[in-house]
Amino acid sequence: MVERVSHEGTVVKVEGNDVFVRIVQTSACASCSLSRHCNSAESKEKTVVAQAGADSFRVGESVLVSVSSSLGHKAVSLGFGIPLALLLAVVVAANGLTGSEPVAALCGVGALIPYYILLYVFRARIGDVLRITVVRKNS
């Protein structure tokens, strides 16, 4: 059984097969009944792009946006896990070779630049793998 992470959202724009959906991400505190008395409650609006396929959606329509949890883990790994491992490996190696912590830190940060450039260059291919689905809320 594939677990899915879903969020309710509203269609804000439709361009061809792409559906732009605004979702409101809330922390657990924001849904708490005491949140108005507490400063830790927060929520953020985000717009995600999903491919609609054969379905047609209208602006303002209420939908569910979802992704499988395994694909979510892949996305987190690409965005945070691999860069962290790369940064640490380069900092340790550069510090061992040069003995200078500032140089090692600069090398570590510098190693992230080509990584994120590659992510940007291959964003379409990555987007094909990390597919976000959108369905009507009443379906």
Image (cartoon, rainbow, N blue to C red):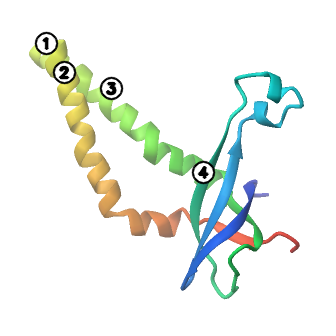
In the image, residue 63 sits, relative to residue 108, either above or below, namely below
Q: Residues within 10 Å of mark 2 (few under 14, many from 20)?
A: many
The crowd level at tag 4 (other Cα within 10 Å; few <14, some 14-19, many 20+) is some
Locate residue 86: give its quadrant: top left
Return the residue nearer the eye: 98 or 58. Answer: 58
Query: Pointers 2 and 4 in contact (CB under 8 A)?
Result: no
99 relative to 36, above or below: above
Q: Quadrant of residue 93?
A: top left
Q: Is residue 99 left or right of residue 75?
A: left
Labels 1 and 2 touching (C-beta < 8 A) = yes
Residue at which label 1 appears: 100
Residue 113: x and y in percent read 24, 43
* Whole-number angstrom distance, CA of label 4 to CA of label 3: 23 Å
Q: Quadrant of residue 89?
A: top left
Disc 1 versus disc 2: distance between alpha carbons? 6 Å
Q: Which mark is residue 88?
A: 3
* x 67%, y 70%: residue: 11
- Tell me the amino acid under the disc marked 1: Ser
Marks 4 and 1 in Cβ contact (< 8 Å): no
Q: Position of residue 1 (x, y in %)?
A: 79, 57
Give the Cα separation between the discs numbered 4 and 1.
37 Å
Q: SS at mark 2?
A: helix
* Residue shown at the point (74%, 55%) measured from the top left: 7
Query: How far apart are the alpha carbons under marks 3 and 2?
Result: 10 Å
Where is residue 57? Give x, y as percent: 70, 81
- For label 4, the residue is 72
Q: Secondary structure at mark 3?
A: helix
Residue at far front of view: 37
Q: Distance of mark 2 from mark 4, alpha carbons? A: 31 Å
Q: Which residue is mark 2?
A: 104
Q: Earlier in the sequence, mark 4 or mark 1?
A: 4
